[in-house]
Amino acid sequence: MNTVRPAAPQLADIEPYDPKYIPAEVMISANENAHDVPFELRREIEREVRKVAFNRYPDPLANDLRDLIAEANGLDRDQVLMGNGGDELLFDMALAWGGPGRTFLNMPPTFSVYKNNAQLTNTAIVDVPRLPDFSIDEEAVIARLAQGDIDYTIVTSPNNPSGNRVHTAFVQRMLEAADTLVMVDEAYFEFSRHTVRHLLNTYENLIILRTFSKAFSLAGVRMGYLLGSENVLREFKKVRQPYSVDAVSQAIARVVYANRSEFERGIEQIIAERGRVFDELNAMEGVEAFPSDANYILFRLGEGIDAGEVWQRLLDAGVLVRDFSRSAGLENCLRVSIGAPEENTRFLEELKASIA
Ligand code: PMP
């Protein structure tokens, strides 16, 4: 047989995830941390990794890490679940709460992985689009949840790619509107310094997603976690890959988490640089930057300036940003991650030159 039958039908409209991660001198496209883990911590990591038995399966649930994270958040081990990056836990959510005959409420434009996961699992998608300034249409979301047929929803705070965060009072209204499982994706919360964690004590239908990829410089290692009720996380355990979090990553993440205060200065610098980049972007003619609580800024180019062409000119000049100009609701928009100060300055200079 020299042919193969088609893949599952729900894949037909899905494009493989492509972050367009092209090597460049200044990599500010993927919301990574510009700085790797500090040298002294890397030394400690090397010592810990040396102790790992490569021939043995890892602790499937990474209980040492769960204990560290639980203690720091005033929770029990059973209220924490680790994943191979936040991405794995997002997929697990679609597996556990989605599926045929089930419904996901999305608030686009937002992180595209949510929609993909719903499509992959044959979950129906109800879109409640954001308003032109990317704030959530709160009344529309609450009204839709109140109909009672939404199985799960994800609200991103701060939102990717727009950068704005959600109002806590609105999250509370969502949690009370129905028994829908509500995920608050706090992948970037270290840069907004806002969390809804205190609501976990009251609402069983709340889960919070976090990651080591951004503030803690571990995008290359793949480590994310959920905070939620024991009952909800028990369902996630049924669908997760048993050994998705490998022993080396567990060792690395333990050292980083135990020393997380060392990342505080870097976070502060990113927040300060975010203010500078935002002001300088808005001072440019033909550029509208959207206020951000995260480690990136979305900006729209004015009429007569083609964002796709600007993206290419920036790349030709050695600066890689993210092009969203062909995404619905993000017409003519680019997103820049906040890098080291000299990278941000170089980006601003090259952008100025490429729209002059
Ligand atoms: N949520 C959001 C909003 C993100 O932007 C990302 C990273 N792109 C993730 C979750 C997942 O991050 P990771 O898999 O690296 O933990």
Image (tube, rainbow, N blue to C red):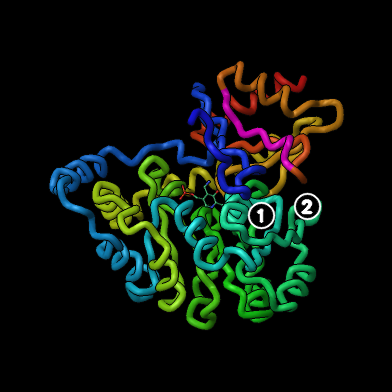
Specify the quadrant of the image occupied by residue 178: bottom right
Specify the quadrant of the image occupied by residue 67: bottom left
Residue 195, image x, y percentages = 53, 66
Q: Earlier in the sequence, mark 2 or mark 1?
A: 2
Name which residue lies at 75% across and 22% down.
Answer: 355
Specify the quadrant of the image occupied by residue 137: bottom right
For the residue labelled by badge 1, is the local secondary structure a helix, a strand or a loop? loop
- Residue at the spot of label 1: 164
* Labelled pair 2, 1 in contact (Cβ < 8 Å): yes
Residue 161, image x, y percentages = 64, 46
Farthest residue to the top: give it.
316
Compared with 189, 25 (above or below) is above
Magenta span: 319-327
- Residue at the spot of label 2: 133
Judge from the rendering whether residue 224 lies leftward or rightward of residue 311; answer left or right: left
Compared with 21, 166 (above or below) is below
Q: Which residue is nearer to you in this view: 266 or 24?
A: 24
